[in-house]
Amino acid sequence: MPTLIFKLNSHLYLRDPQNTLLGQKIIEASVDLIDRLGFEQFNFKKLAEEIDSTEASIYRYFENKHRLLLYLIGWYWSWLEYRIDLFTSSLTDPKEKLKACLRVIAEKKSYDSTFEFIDEEALHRIVVAELDKAYLTKQVDSDNKEGLFGGFKSLCKKIAEWVAQVNPNYPSPHALVSTLLLAAKQQIFFADHLPTLTNIGKGENRYLKLEIFLNTVLFNSIQE
Amino acid sequence: MPTLIFKLNSHLYLRDPQNTLLGQKIIEASVDLIDRLGFEQFNFKKLAEEIDSTEASIYRYFENKHRLLLYLIGWYWSWLEYRIDLFTSSLTDPKEKLKACLRVIAEKKSYDSTFEFIDEEALHRIVVAELDKAYLTKQVDSDNKEGLFGGFKSLCKKIAEWVAQVNPNYPSPHALVSTLLLAAKQQIFFADHLPTLTNIGKGENRYLKLEIFLNTVLFNSIQE
DNA sequence: GCAGTTATAATAGCTTTACTATCATAAAGT
DNA sequence: ACTTTATGATAGTAAAGCTATTATAACTGC
């Protein structure tokens, strides 16, 4: 059985890491390392040690560590959209699609064996902790021109279209959807570190609580 | 007439910059420099050049540039809360308080002469672009223990209490308020750099549009 | 099976950042 | 006048973030 592979924007990398053994090791180990150290403490030297390679070799795959982060986050959004498609394609009612979609967004993430050498649980923690650093930079405009945020934009657009189908008069579908996509990450982070800023809590039911929160905000906001 | 001064958490600084001329110059110039360069490109060496002082002198005021950012952001939230108090203290109905509060949050920021040596317009841009970097770090828990996020938490708590007064049964007032406070920054950033993620637009009416967006989400979400 | 291309490794070095330490001097407080 | 304190001047260190060069191994086409 052939494993699925996402075709990501080619500006994200210099050499496609999915095509080579070294590339795969870079991806696999960087997810692990960034998750453990945080993006600030992470660098190519440590990554090279981890996979018994060299800094110079990694620089042949990624221009710098910021691009690598964009790659991982791009992969994450592709994966999330793939899962949303999986759970919505059989549905016709846009309301139902939105509900299923919010479930996928809020659910607990665990290893997806469809994709080797990516630990989705760790990657999700990375996205929660580092997502905003991907675009909150001075080069956001040139990065954007190169299409490096395509994954997020594509998902946002898809969901916003369902919103528009439910209520064509709602004026801010994109703003609402981007707010909710980011809130889903932020509230998990707050629950772990700044609990007075949320009501999600730390227990296993946090995913359900988050889903309910997102549902309430979405459907009440767009009601006709 | 005595200028107002906010008493910020003393762990934010080593020496209180509000008390000395050099401290004031550090604050004033750092707002300007971070706004122009972005937080990543900003450092104490450049700041020292800007105010004709030295790196070592600045290190006597702030442990590192991250603490300086936390200081500025802390100041910003104090200022916002001060303005919210200003426009809500005469109101009694919590719904009206919330409306006035969202107006302050969404409004265009301009220089407030109550506070010398702080350019609130530039500081607002800094908060829009750098806020998330304040807490998305590996040391978030120890920073939090020191009370470095007190400004944000205090404001969030105050607004969440009004929400609870409007609808005591709404289960997630803190989550909703923190989501909206962050959304107010994000949507402005998206409007400037990733416009497909929002519907706020670039014109002068963006502040009104943002206010309406926040109002819709808030009041529809908590309706009984 | 050889020639040529390409991927990786090994090593070195350079610039900038983020700090730390030391000493001199000027100003302020008592 | 004496001393504490703030600032400035200068130097230095370790790490980060690259870049460049050469060597070697592996694969590719003929």
Image: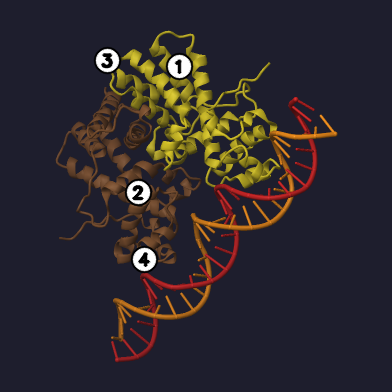
Chain colours: A brown, B yellow, C red, D orange
Circle number at residue A87? none
Task: Where is residue A105? Give x, y as percent.
Answer: 26, 38
- Chain bearing tag 1 is B
Q: Crowding near pointer 2: few (<14 within 10 Å), some, many (20+)?
A: many
Q: Nearer the viewer, residue A87 or B28?
A: B28
The Cα–Cα distance between marks 2 and 1, rounded to whole angstroms, is 41 Å
Give the amino acid type for the residue marked by disc 2 in the picture: Asp
Give the amino acid type for the residue marked by disc 1 in the picture: Ala
Q: Closer to the observer: label 4 or label 1?
A: 4
Q: Are callouts 4 and 3 both on one chain? A: no
Q: Residue at x 51, y 45 (%)?
A: A138
Residue under label 2, please give it.
A35
Q: Closer to the observer: label 4 or label 3?
A: 4
Q: Are callouts 2 and 4 both on one chain? A: yes
Q: Residue at x 66, y 41 (%)?
A: B57
Q: Are callouts 3 and 2 both on one chain? A: no
Q: Nearer the viewer, residue A36 or A159?
A: A36
The Cα–Cα distance between marks 4 and 3, rounded to whole angstroms, is 60 Å
Q: Closer to the observer: label 3 or label 2?
A: 2
> Which image quadrant for residue B157?
top left
Q: For numbered disc 1, what is the local secondary structure?
A: helix
Q: For numbered disc 3, what is the local secondary structure?
A: loop
- Chain bearing tag 3 is B
**In this rendering, position of residue D8 left or right of residue A104:** right
Tell me whether circle 2 and circle 1 mark residues in contact (CB < 8 Å): no
Residue under label 4, please give it.
A52
Residue B165 showing in the rendered view? yes
Residue under label 3, please give it.
B224
Residue under label 1, please give it.
B100
Q: Crowding near pointer 3: few (<14 within 10 Å), some, many (20+)?
A: few
The Cα–Cα distance between marks 4 and 1, rounded to whole angstroms, is 59 Å
